[in-house]
Amino acid sequence: MTRQSQLNSIIRRSTKSVLISALFSSMTLSSAGGSMAQLVKTVTVGAAERATVYDHVAVVGTLIAKEEMRVNALIEGKEIRQILVEAGDVVRKGQPLALLDVAQAELLLERNTVQLSRVAVAVAQENSRIDVASVTARETRKAVERSRSLFGKGVVSQQLLDEHENAFSRAKSQLEMAQQALTLAEADRKLVELERSEIALTIERSTVRATASGLILIRNARVGSVTSPSGDPLFSMAQDSLVEVEASVSEASFIRLKEGMGAEIIVPGRTGPIHGRVRLSAARIDPGTRMGLVRVELVQGQGLVPGAFVYGRIETGQRSNVVVPATAVRSQDGKSSVFVVENDLVRARSVTLGSPAGSTIELLSGVKDGEIVVIRSGSFLKAGEKILAVRSTDPEADKLSFLKIDGGAAR
């Protein structure tokens, strides 16, 4: 027999019982004018059903940049001349953000240009001296070789041979000196070229650029201020404009959280929750507040405003249990019970409550899947009392099975 058939059978039996009771009362209690409603109470019933219960941890936090980047000036002691962006602007990697004073660097660059011309001339002169010294050395070497060959034949005197050898030695010395001078001149040119590269780098770094694409969060740069390594960064930006949630949770809840757990976050101005997952958990709990920090990465992490207050929940687990409407549970003297319908009679059944979820509540024990319960249990009912069972006209109360039953409140 199906659950619906079982419910209909109970209703039919209750109706039949009421008719018999009414007939009997009309024959025996006509003087009292008792009605059927005075003999049998009409009670709304429904079937307890099994559903999936999701446990969660409530979180309250703030939207922050997933990766906040600080943009500083790469050179210090320079005056800021122009600001090119404002907070709230979306910039691309390498885009200019501010311009620094480059007047002194430009003067150094002009001076360096003159020095570079001078060392270029000096290198050219030394190359010319080497060419002249090389020619002289070749000529004197030939003269020495000729004199030596003729000296053996007695044609050239010793004095002339000595003169030629001395000339060749002087030519070699002059060539070596010219080569050394060329080496020094080339070293000077490299030094000047290095200085030029440094000056060019200074001019390039005088344009403060975005180190990555993203959203400008804070602009501390002011026209006329001087850059300093000890001051605040000129700009703060959210890399790739990605925003996530930083939330504090209690010590008891923090130990239940793990990276990768799903989350639903309510953001002001957004219709419906934004889904996310736990990306990062703190390594320890703050000993002063007994709270732990978690980071929740959002699926829609762009277009959100950092600093906004948000709240939501992180799902920590799920289980399958019987659920009934919260109105079906009676609480008295610290104990909970539910009226179960058996053969048109109500029976009080002690139950163990689980997690509440909106208009329903989880039952850990006491009621089985498919049993018929009184949806609205009031003090007007007594255990063992005969009732007229009717189905609820509320479709939500009649349908107790949900795709998702949350174990706890969102906030």
Image: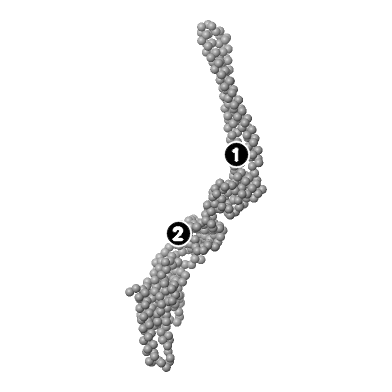
Where in the figure is residue 9, as x and y percent of width and height?
Answer: 35, 78
Q: Residue at x 51, y 8 (%)?
A: 152
Please rate how many residues cluster around mark 2, counting C-alpha atoms within 10 Å: few if below 14, some from 14 to 19, many from 20. Answer: some
Q: Quadrant of residue 24?
A: bottom left
Q: Which amino acid type is marked by label 1?
A: Ala
Residue at which label 1 appears: 200
Residue at 44% in and 71% down? 361
Q: Residue furthest right?
A: 224
Q: Which residue is mark 2?
A: 261
Q: How is the image coloured?
A: one colour
Residue nearer the viewer, 82 or 345: 82
- Residue 337: where, in percent of width, then height? 42, 76
Whether label 2 touches label 1, CB < 8 Å: no
Task: Judge whether residue 231 can be spotted in this image.
Answer: no
Relative depth, front residue between 41 and 165: 41
Decide: is 82 above or below 46: above
Examine the rendering and report whether any part of residue 300 can be seen.
yes
Q: Where residue 399 sits: x, y (%)?
A: 41, 72
Above or below: residue 123 compared with residue 239: above
Q: Tag count in the figure?
A: 2
Q: Is residue 4 above or below residue 108?
A: below
Q: Residue at x 59, y 43 (%)?
A: 205
In the image, residue 155 above or below residue 88: above
Instruction: Give the structural element (helix, strand or loop) at label 2.
Output: loop
- At label 2, the amino acid type is Met
